[in-house]
Image (cartoon, rainbow, N blue to C red):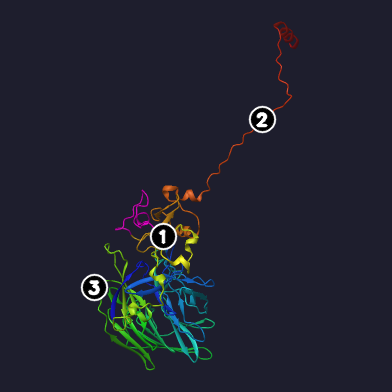
Amino acid sequence: MTLRPLNPVNCEGLLQPGCSLLQLDGEVLLFGQKGWPKRSCPTGVFGVRIKLSELRLRALSFSDDSNYLPPLRCPAVCRLDPHDGLPESYLIHGGRTPNNEISSSLYALSMDSRGSNRKLTLRCKERELVGEVPGARYGHTISVVQSRGKTAFVIFGGRSYMPAKERTSENWNKVIDCPPRVFLFDQEFCCCSAYTFPELSDGQSFHAALAREDRVYFLGGHSLTSDSRPPRLFCLHVELLQGSPLVSCDSLDCGLSISSAVIARTGPSHKYIILGGYQSDSQKRMECSTVTLDEKGIHIEPLQQPQWTPDIVHSRTWYGGAAGELGMLLAVPTEGRSSQTDVHYFYLVNFQKEVKGEDDPAQQCCSQELSDYDNSTPLEDSEELYFGREPHELEDCSEGEGDKYNEKDEEDESQSGYWIKCWRGCQLDHNTWEPFYSTELHRPAMIFCSKGEAGHWVHAQCMELTETLLLTLSQGNQKYFCLEHGGLPHQEMTPPRKVIPLQRTPLKVKHRKSHTKLRSSPFKKSVFRRLFD
């Protein structure tokens, strides 16, 4: 087992904790990161390519008949091998969005087609569970079991928000362990049923679930109730009988104290490698283990660990996923080092012995040769919001010049960087800045001011925008103007209508006699005066 550092090419800020790595049609996919325009991925799914110690990402698209797949972090993911003429696919349940919303939906992800340039097109269908449906959760697992020629799925564990009746303003975002119930649903009708067992007394999340035929093993996990990671190991036995299924649970002794581990299958047999994870809140698990499932049960043996680098040893957090035949992809945050431009360090863990030449797995692609990866465009950090773009900039062209990098598309960092002085009242400092919105992570959210022909970027926090208003502006095509150029009243009020005054010409009578002035002498005046008196 060897460790190889990777150099991310314009994608170092895109991999975040909670992301998932999938494998479809021989290609590794990154799922769980929301893409934003201009040069990002509106679908949130990327193709991963590792070649010559370089890590590149490529935006993927969905078919027209697909359902919307939101960016989900820490979901339950289960791979389905090809069967009965159906292609390989994935089931994705639950998960947490970048806006801290927890999902309870179930999605089926598969390959739709490949374009003329071998670009992968995905298809996503949302499936509805009926019966005793599991609630919204994340950090749980979903496993496939097969018994008596039938197929079913098992959902267990996870975390969720407190019940609505118990939530207050103080504990609104507090999460708790889901009740330790096991959910079983069939593949055809998605009819779900729940089971409880005395062995499963406490809830657990971020555990490992390994399945073989009609048995599922739950290994490790973290419990919020006791704030511990006990070395637990449970075996769930499922018999899919003609009527109702028969489910039983046993507690085993040879468990591991671990959570959030990376698990990779090393071949067609049920042999797995467990790497990474945590033993406690302040201690990573540096050891590696191999797990083998056979007719007799489960066997856990230690495995020689790779030679960890100082960055990995001294880091507080790490995460990653299985990258198919390439091995495992690990990411270590730089943890606030101002001198480092990259957000993470990336490493590839190879299971096989390192060899030189053409057989080096790190020099092979995880898919066929795609020149678009070499010309891949820089991708923005998925955590930050970019508003004010036109709808046509969201279109993902799969052919022609749409996927090629164009130097003219690059923006001047001195004018569009994150830490610019956006206006005279800007107070953001790179050294003291802290996330203000729930969608921010490493950089502040920005919004585009449409003043003038070129426009300019401003910080949403400097513009005193609420998160609700920020999301509202992102959904429409209306233009935004910063406080220096009119602000919200300028864009929300209807501009005053210019009324041209009417020039009314008075009507003139053609044959109108003018008033005649009577001229009288003093004698006549005296006569008329006496007459009227």
Q: Which residue is mark 1?
A: 409
Secondary structure at badge 2 equals loop
**Residue 449 is one of the magenta-drawn residues:** no
Three-letter code, disc 2: Pro
Taking the image as shown, residue 200 lies to the left or right of residue 332, namely right
Q: Do we see residue 276 in this rendering?
A: no
In this picture, is 471 found above or below 138? Answer: above
Secondary structure at badge 1 equals helix
Q: Compare marks 2 and 1 and give the one earlier in the sequence.
A: 1
The residues colored magenta run 406-433
Cα distance, mark 1 to mark 3? 38 Å
* Residue farthest to the bottom, as pictured: 296
**Residue 417 is one of the magenta-drawn residues:** yes
Q: Compare marks 1 and 3 and give the one earlier in the sequence.
A: 3
Q: Quadrant of the N terminus?
A: bottom left
Q: Compare marks 3 and 2 and give the one earlier in the sequence.
A: 3
Secondary structure at badge 3 equals helix
Three-letter code, disc 1: Asp
Question: Quadrant of the rendered structure where residue 238 is?
Answer: bottom left
Q: Which residue is mark 2?
A: 506
Taking the image as shown, residue 348 lies to the left or right of residue 450, namely left
Callout in the foreground (2, 1)? 1
> Where does the image place residue 114, in percent across and percent down from the top left?
48, 75
Taking the image as shown, residue 290 lies to the left or right of residue 47, namely left
Along the line of sight, the residue nearer the viewer: 287 or 328: 328
Q: Which residue is mark 3?
A: 310
> Where does the image place residue 257, in percent across and percent down from the top left?
31, 81
Question: Quadrant of the rendered structure where residue 444 is?
Answer: bottom left
